[in-house]
Image (cartoon, rainbow, N blue to C red):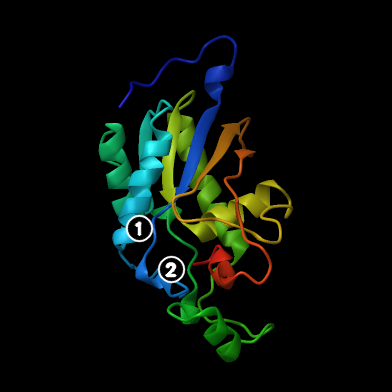
Amino acid sequence: MSAQRSPDPSGESATTTFSIVRHGQTDWNLHHRIQGSTDIPLNATGRAEAAAAAERLQSRRWDAIVSSPLLRASESAHIIAAELGLSEPLIVPALTERHHGAIEGLTFAERQHRFPDGVVVPGLETRRDVVDRVLAALATLAAGRAGQRVLVLSHGGIIGTLLRHVTEGERPRHGEFIANGSVHDFRWQNDQLLLTHFDATTRSPGDRGEAAASPVL
């Protein structure tokens, strides 16, 4: 892992780059079950997706890699770190997936049946709380890694919530979703998170796989 550099007069080193990667597939992803904080490991496809993400990231320089504590993210992080020659991923608890309480383990159809729109879901973490804890974690990382490029292994719900926050709800657009293994680029500058690239995957209306588009899986 590269040593931290001193700030330069141009101010460029005050910017920390975060590339946030969604973990590889799990069996619950495959069967469109809401995972939340339930700790489901990668399946074989997910491990291959993590390796493919590492191959895509080979052309860039990285200073560090951090991860959510959940197995699907941390295993993805270990695969990517090994492929890129990075040190052991740092586990950051605040990067864990949004807590979905009573709907974890359900399909979206089951969720709608048990908790129709407008019905409170016990234990469901608010998006505001997700934004607050994740931004605080990124701010802490940025403070210690000014001018560095940091890989972050996290979750679809986290990435989707950050996208909505920084784009004021404009992304993801209808038909866009956050694929397993996708890489989304942000920069932390002037105490603010800014989007520089959304690695969107799109599906046409009526595509049978569209149920997988939800970022809360």
Q: Quadrant of residue 105?
A: bottom left
Residue 118 on image: x %, y % = 69, 83
Q: Amino acid at mark 2?
A: Asn
The disc at residue 46 is: 1
Residue type, numbered disc 1: Gly
Q: Nearer the viewer, residue 162 or 7?
A: 162
Q: How many marks?
A: 2
Q: Residue furthest top?
A: 9
User: In the displayed structure, would residue 72 be above or below residue 81?
Assistant: below
The percent coordinates of residue 187 (x first, y second) are: 57, 34
Please tell me which residue is depicted at 52% across the width and 46% down the height of the picture: 136
Point out the tag, 2 or 1, that comes first from the N-terminus. Answer: 2
- Identified at 73% across, 51% down, the residue is 168
The residue carrying pointer 2 sits among few (fewer than 14), some (14 to 19) or many (20 or more) residues within 10 Å by Cα, namely many
Q: In the displayed structure, would residue 120 be above or below residue 15?
A: below
Instruction: Tell me how far mark 2 sits from mark 1, CA to CA.
Output: 10 Å
Q: Quadrant of the N terminus?
A: top left
Dot 2 falls on a residue whose secondary structure is helix
Q: Which residue is mark 2?
A: 29
- Taking the spot 36% from the left edge, 65% from the top edge, the residue there is 26
